[in-house]
């Protein structure tokens, strides 16, 4: 009988070792699941999100409006006859006029229209880029959160497998009269808690993957296995600008573009206060004589030179400069906080939780070996296993926060995830 118990304990130890050592966190993978990387998730969002399609249409519309802004005004044709009366000779007694007029935009309105249209195009392009960056950020954040929950769910399944094995072993010992009913009930309670935790973890993982599917532009999540190396402490990308990387953020570029738009509006308002020239040239027939006519007309800017609108446009330029300064200050603050968060979670993962995880696994292995040899009791075995599970969970949580801090830091530096 003692040999049977020993064989059962050896089998239990082997199963647990396989569970723990099958991957860096002790996780087994579903072979039927489809691997989904972060880049695949972002590509899906870029091709399927309706917001990006709408922003692209707005950009295309602004390009056509820029084309329209550069067109020259159409000429106007006039034809009239004077001194018409019954019984008269039309060719000799009727005065006939045929002339055309053309607006010559000497005020600079055409250049102002083109500048404004270019500003609108640039703003629509930046708005589209902002939509892309915002969606990329949400996809990356949701992806890493779903991957964290995927690992926690696999960790919960691992614990269920362990408690089932230990329950089977202790059920045999109870049937042989070697342990008390209270000890068996304790193991059953831990197994029930592990199963309940697995169900909760499964629900949380499914919810997170459904949120990821929504960010990817999909109606429902697939049978995905998120394949990014969760255990790796990857460094963030290097910013393109070493001096002020926060100025590469789209929010700063949009604020800078708002100044250009305000300046274009100021140019437009100044042009509105200056007159254009309407030139005319044509044909006149009077008393049988054919002659030419030529001339021009223009408004005289004596009273209204659009002074109020020009002054208001100047205030708009200054207001947008102040807004740019505020956005730059906010971006610099966000970058400082993102760096602090990244450095803290990196220390937490590498210097604190990783050594604790190794110690917890060693303690659990020692407790199993001691329990197999009768050198420790059931309570110490369960405590060691709970310690291992709690330490692994804390390490997974810390890793999840680390990956989120990397995403936030790259966004604060104006980089894509």
Image (tube, grey):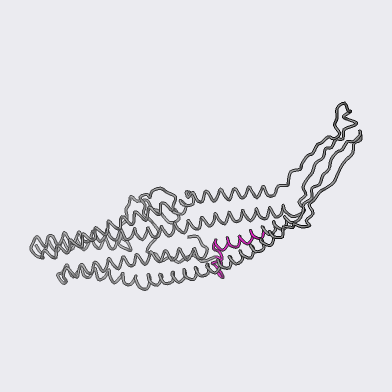
Image location of residue 104, percent across then percent down: 78, 49
Relative to the observer, which residue lies in front, 1 or 394?
394
> Where does the image place residue 412, in percent across and percent down from the top left?
50, 65
The stretch drawn in magenta includes residue 18: no
Image quarter of residue 155: bottom left
Picture quadrant of residue 240: bottom right
Q: Residue furthest left?
A: 177
Horizontal side, residue 326 vs residue 173: left or right: right
Image-based side of 67 in relation to 279, left or right: left
Q: Find residue 124 and report its horizontal and vertical position in percent.
A: 58, 54
Q: 327 and 265: which one is in front?
A: 265
Which residue is depicted at the point 54% across and 51% down? Answer: 55
Q: Main secondary structure of the magenta part?
A: helix
What is the number of callouts on the image? 0
User: On the rendered image, what quadrant is the N terminus found in?
Assistant: bottom left
**Which image quadrant is residue 5 in?**
bottom left
Q: Image point 68% across, 62% down: which residue?
A: 311
Along the line of sight, the residue nearer the viewer: 65 or 314: 314
Residue 394 horizontal side relative to residue 255, left or right: left
- Looking at this view, is 278 or 403 the one in front? 278
Residue at 22% of width from left, 70% of height from top? 366
Residue 257 x, y percent position in the rendering: 61, 60
Can you name the residue that lies furthest to the top here? 87
| Above or below for 27 versus 296 | below
The answer to whether residue 273 is left or right of residue 250 is right
Whether residue 254 is in magenta: the answer is yes
Magenta range is 240-263
């Amino acid at each position: 009988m003692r040999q049977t118990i020993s064989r059962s304990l050896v089998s239990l130890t082997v199963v647990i070792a396989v569970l723990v050592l099958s991957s860096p966190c002790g996780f087994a993978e579903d072979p039927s699941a489809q691997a989904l990387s972060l880049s695949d998730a972002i590509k899906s969002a870029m091709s399927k999100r309706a917001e990006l399609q709408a922003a692209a249409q707005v950009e295309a519309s602004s390009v056509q409006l820029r084309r329209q802004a550069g067109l020259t005004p159409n000429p106007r044709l006039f034809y009239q006859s004077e001194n018409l009366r019954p019984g008269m000779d039309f060719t000799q007694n009727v005065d006939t006029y045929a002339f055309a007029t053309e607006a010559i935009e000497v005020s600079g309105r055409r250049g102002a229209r083109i500048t404004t249209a270019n500003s609108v195009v640039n703003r629509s392009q930046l708005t589209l880029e902002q939509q892309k960056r915002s969606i990329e950020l949400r996809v990356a954040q949701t992806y890493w959160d779903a991957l964290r929950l995927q690992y926690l769910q696999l960790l919960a399944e691992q614990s269920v497998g362990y408690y089932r094995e230990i329950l089977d072993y202790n059920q045999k010992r109870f049937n042989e009269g070697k342990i008390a009913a209270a000890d068996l009930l304790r193991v059953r309670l831990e197994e029930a808690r592990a199963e309940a935790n697995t169900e909760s973890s499964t629900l949380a993982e499914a919810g997170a993957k459904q949120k990821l599917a929504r960010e990817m532009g999909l109606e429902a999540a697939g049978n995905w296995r998120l394949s990014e190396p969760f255990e790796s402490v990857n460094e963030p990308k290097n910013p393109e600008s070493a001096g002020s990387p926060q100025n590469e953020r789209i929010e700063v570029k949009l604020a800078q573009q708002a100044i250009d738009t305000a300046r274009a509006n100021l140019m437009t308002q100044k042009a509105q206060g200056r007159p254009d020239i309407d030139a005319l040239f044509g044909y006149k027939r009077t008393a049988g004589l054919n002659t030419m006519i030529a001339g021009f007309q223009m408004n005289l800017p004596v009273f209204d030179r659009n002074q109020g609108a020009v002054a208001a446009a100047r205030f708009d330029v200054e207001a947008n400069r102040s807004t740019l300064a505020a956005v730059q200050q906010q971006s610099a603050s966000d970058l400082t906080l993102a760096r602090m968060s990244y450095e803290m979670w990196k220390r937490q993962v590498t210097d604190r939780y990783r050594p604790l995880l190794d110690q917890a696994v060693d303690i659990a292995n020692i407790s199993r070996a001691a329990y197999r040899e009768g050198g420790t009791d059931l309570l110490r075995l369960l405590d060691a296993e709970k310690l291992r599970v709690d330490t692994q969970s804390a390490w997974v949580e810390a890793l999840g926060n680390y990956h989120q801090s990397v995403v936030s830091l790259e966004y604060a530096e104006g980089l894509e995830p």
